[in-house]
Amino acid sequence: MMDDIDQFGGVRLGAGTLYGAITRLEEKGWIRRVESEERRKPYRITADGVAHLEGQMAELDRIGKTTLRRLRHA
């Protein structure tokens, strides 16, 4: 997961940061752990997690569009 975040976001997270974030996401019900026989612990986004993410993405889209409109008039 840390490699994926580094590749697409250009940010290298420490293990403590990642595990803290996973804990918070689980506590909010946005992800859940999937049973696995492997050493790694896979997670899956929940329906509530999808809804929250869609809301966040809509807000980012609104901010981006507002910023571009304002830049055109600068």
Image (cartoon, helix red, strand yellow):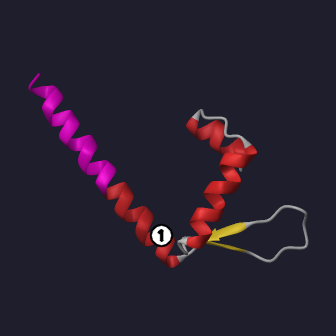
Q: Residue furthest top?
A: 74
Numbered-mark total: 1
Q: Residue furthest left?
A: 73
Q: Is residue 28 left or right of residue 7?
A: left
Q: Residue at x 67, y 40 (%)?
A: 13
Q: Residues within 10 Å of mark 1 (few under 14, many from 20)?
A: few
Q: Is residue 32 left or right of residue 64?
A: right
Q: Position of residue 61 (x, y in %)?
A: 30, 49
Q: Is residue 60 left or right of residue 18?
A: left
Q: Quarter holding the C terminus? A: top left
In-front residue for pair 24/73:
24
Q: Position of residue 12 (x, y in %)?
A: 67, 35
Amino acid residing under circle 1? Val
Q: Residue at x 53, y 71 (%)?
A: 28
Query: From what the image shows, is residue 36 above or below residue 73?
Result: below
Q: Residue at x 47, y 69 (%)?
A: 50
Start-end of magenta stretch: 59-74
Q: Position of residue 26 (x, y in %)?
A: 61, 70
Query: From what the image shows, is residue 1 above or below residue 69?
Result: below
> Disc 1 designates what residue?
50
Residue 10 colored magenta?
no
Mark 1 element type: helix
Q: Quadrant of residue 20?
A: bottom right
Q: Residue at x 47, y 76 (%)?
A: 48
